[in-house]
Image: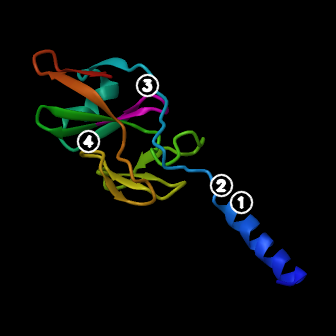
């Protein structure tokens, strides 16, 4: 092997090694934050949740929480940090105009807001879900982890 071929081979090996050190984004490492929220759905700021199919965004969690009224007495709550690259500042899931799809416009991942599952995009993890408990008697929702 001549010197030129040796340099080319070493250069290719170096490039292969450098490109394999790419940051793995799809790690789903959303920081754990204590969530312990009580929503009185009779208050004006939560009134949208009195109708099935509506959702609101509230403070809490790591980057915020989306609460979706799925069925008559059933609610779901999801972390707004996109699981693809949750530590990136703009990695936030937002409702699209359909009100049932959440989109991270940074990476292009899309999720169903009815259950947090992946619709499309680079994320291979669903939205992080928080526990919910609805009390019909007091028309209140408890969100926790």
Q: Which residues are magenta?
A: 57-67
In-front residue for pair 143/41: 143
Q: Is residue 38 magenta?
A: no
Q: Is residue 111 above or below residue 65?
A: below
Of 105 and 12, which appears nearest the observer?
A: 12
Mark linked to residue 60 = 3
Nearer the observer, disc 4 or disc 3? Answer: 3
- Indicate left or right for 58 with 89 as reference: left
Q: CA distance from mark 2 to mark 4?
A: 43 Å
Q: What count of labels does the image hold?
A: 4
**Tag 1 near tag 2, CB within 8 Å:** yes
What SS does tag 1 mark? helix
Give the residue at mark 1.
18
Q: Would you identify the image quadrant in which residue 64 lies?
A: top left
Q: Which residue position holds label 2?
A: 21
Element at label 4: loop
Residue 47 image offset from top left, x and y in percent: 27, 29
Q: Position of residue 56 (x, y in %)?
A: 34, 36
Image disc number at residue 54: 4
The location of residue 58, given as percent across then percent down, is 40, 29
Query: Which of the two marks, 2 or 4, is nearer to us in this view?
Result: 2
> Residue at position x 43%, y 25% from top?
60
Residue at 29% of width from left, 51% of height from top? Answer: 100
**Dot 2: what SS?**
loop
């Amino acid at each position: 092997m001549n010197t030129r071929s040796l340099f080319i081979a070493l250069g290719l090996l170096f490039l292969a090694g450098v490109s394999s050190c790419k940051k793995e984004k799809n790690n789903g490492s959303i920081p754990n934050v204590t969530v312990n929220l009580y929503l009185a759905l009779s208050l004006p700021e939560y009134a949208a949740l009195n109708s099935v199919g509506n959702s609101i965004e509230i403070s809490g969690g790591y980057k915020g929480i989306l609460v979706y009224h799925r069925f008559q007495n059933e609610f779901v709550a999801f972390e707004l940090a996109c699981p693809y690259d949750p530590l990136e500042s703009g990695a936030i899931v937002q409702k699209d105009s359909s009100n049932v799809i959440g989109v991270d416009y940074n990476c292009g991942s899309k999720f169903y807001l009815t259950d947090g599952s992946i619709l499309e995009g680079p994320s291979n993890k669903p939205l992080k879900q928080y526990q919910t408990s609805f009390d019909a008697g007091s028309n209140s929702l408890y969100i926790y982890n």
